[in-house]
Image (cartoon, grey):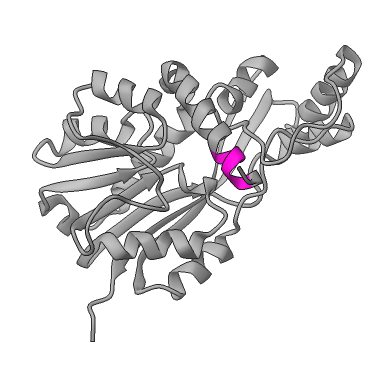
Amino acid sequence: MNEMNRFQRRVHEAFDQAGMFYDRHAVLQRQAMLKLLTLLPESSHQVPFWLDVGSGTGLVYEALAAQLPAIDVVCFDLAAGMLKVAGTKGSRLLVQGDMHRLPFADASLPVVISNFALQWTDHPKHLLAEFSRVLSDEGIVAFSVPVQGSLQALSKGWAAAGLVPPINELPSGKDWLDAVQKNALSVVQIWNDRLEYRDDDARQALALVRDLGAGTRKKPAMGLMSPRRWQKVLNAWSLLSEGRGYCIDYEVLWMVLAKKPPY
C-alpha cells in the first residue's frame, strides 16, 4: 500500500470514529453550509435530488429537510460512521465511497454539493473533472472548502514549540480557480471569508479540529508533546489569537459552478 493509500485509510478511520462527536463540534462547518445554501440559484430548488459529497453526518440533508423537503439528498461519504449518524436523522439515501470515483452514471445528477470536505483532495482539477462527469447539462456544482491560510494561529503556536502543526497544507483559492478553468465549468458565484471560533479553554478549541477527524496528518508528527512544550504552544497560540480566547480560524472559499453545455 503506497503512502497516499495509507493516508486515505487513516482519514477513513478518523472520520469513522468522529461520527458520534461531529455535530457537537461542527460549529464552523455549519456556518459554512448555511452560507453555501444562500448562494445556490433558484433553479437548484426545482430539481428532485442533490448529491452531497463528503456529507458527513448529514448537515445538508437536515437543512434541506427543513427548508426544501421536496428535494431528496443522497448522502455520500467515505466513512460509514458518518453515514450511520446521517441515517439516524432520517436520511434514506446513503452511499459510501471515494469522492474521486463517484459510482454514478455520466450526466446523471442535477446538483452536486459539498461542504468542508474537498480539502482532503490533492488534485482539485481531477476532482472537479469527476464532478463534471456526473453532472447533467447545465447542472450545478456548489461547495465550500477551507483553503491555504487556515488555522494560522494554531499552526504558529505549534511551530513555536518545535512541533509539526496538526494540520495539512491545503490547496489555495487559486488552485481551485485553475481547476475550474481546466474543466467544462463556469463560475456562477464565488465568495471568500474567514470563519473563526474562540474559546478560553484551549482543549475545547482544539476539539474543533481533533474530534472532527480533521487532525489526520499526511506526514507523521515529529516530537513529543511534553508539558513544557504544551505550555509553549498555549503561550504562542494565545498571543497569536490576540488574547481573545484560543482561535480556530479557517479561510473559506465558496463556489457555485455551472456545467457548460456542449458545443
At 55% from the left and 21% from the top, the residue drawn is 211
Locate the N terminus and report the quarter of the image it occupies.
top right
Residue 254 image position (x, y, % from top left): 43, 53
Observer-nearest of 239 and 262: 262
* Image quarter of residue 215: top right
Q: Is residue 47 left or right of residue 5?
A: left
Magenta run includes residue 37: no
- In the rendered structure, the answer to whether residue 160 lies left or right of residue 153 reads right
Q: In the displayed structure, would residue 242 be above or below residue 201?
A: below
Q: Nearer the viewer, residue 188 or 89?
A: 89
Q: Find residue 64 and report its image quarter.
A: top left
Disc tally is: 0
The percent position of residue 52, horizontal first and vertical second, equals 30, 43
Instruction: Give left or right: position of 37 versus 159.
Output: left
Residue at horizontal 21 percent and vertical 47 percent from the top: 50
Q: Which residues are magenta?
A: 4-8
